[in-house]
Image: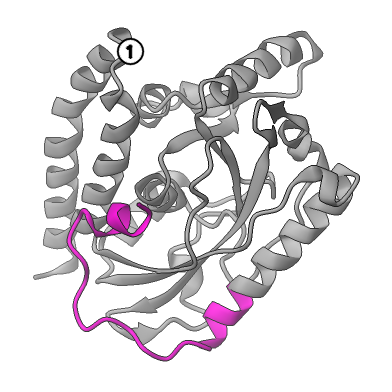
Amino acid sequence: MSATLLRLRRVFLYIALTLPLMPLQALLLVARSPVRRHLPRRYHGWVLQLMGFTVRVTGMPSRRRPTLFVANHVSFIDIEILGALVEGCFIAKADVARWPLFGWLAKLQRTVFVDRRVSSTHRQRNAIRERLDEDDNLILFPEGTTGDGNRALPFKSALFSVADYAGPHGPLEVQPVSIAYTRLDGIPIGRFYRPFLAWYGDMEFIPHLWTMLGLGRVGVEVSFHPTVTLPQFGSRKALAEHCYREVAAGVAGAIAGRRQEWPASPPQAAAPATAAQ
């Protein structure tokens, strides 16, 4: 199949999957059905399959609810990957809410949108606390931007303010997560080709997306590191630095190919979700 036909096929399948599920998820949100938490996870797993992504997981996602998952950020595909592995709500920049289609999808997954305006700080804090009080996991990209995929960027300690939360079961658990795009059609991706998957800098979204849709099967390595809490470190800065070191080491190890084995065939759509049970 040519790259153009592959792109068109993937776009068609994505639209055919997404559009019918959007009103369904909206109804589930209005009815406050428990399924509103489960459907996005299944949806992200299906998207990964039709887009040609195979995810290999090291470690286990925290089973405690709520947990704050903090990960490096390489591409918009990170949303699909973590969304398939973790049942939770993302914390995203406020301008994402205004994106066509993707902004609507983010709202349907109950994303918490944050900005730096003082006037909105109280509202954002309440929204985050509401999610945590309801035992919803939160997913955060504390680099504050996306990188080129070759390394993790330092974490911004200010974004760890949510870690101050303490519920009835004690301090909020924080779990560092590493994401590395490592293989294309079974062949290790070098430094030169990894930016074809990473979306960063002044890259325009649509041209980058069109290029990525024409790629073959992409292998991704995700590592869930041991959970920690803010009281263990005494400050947000120390917590952020610890999480960064864990994530950076995980990314470096995956890129260096320290694990040699790789599945001969991609898992089914539900496999990423099953791995996180």
Task: Residue lying at the far right in this picture: please name it.
Answer: 234
Q: Is residue 69 visible?
A: yes
Magenta span contains residue 274: yes
The residue located at (83%, 51%) in the rendering is 232
Magenta span contains residue 28: no
* Residue extent of the magenta highlight: 251-277
x, y (%) of residue 227? 64, 55
The answer to which quarter of the image holds residue 235 is top right
The quarter in which the N terminus is drawn is bottom left
The residue located at (74%, 47%) in the rendering is 229
Q: Is residue 240 above or below residue 27?
A: below
The residue located at (28%, 9%) in the rendering is 31
The answer to which quarter of the image holds residue 205 is top left
x, y (%) of residue 158? 81, 37
Left or right: residue 256 versus residue 212 is: right
Left or right: residue 265 versus residue 86 is: left
x, y (%) of residue 118? 81, 14
The residue identified by callout 1 is: 32
- Local SS, label 1: loop
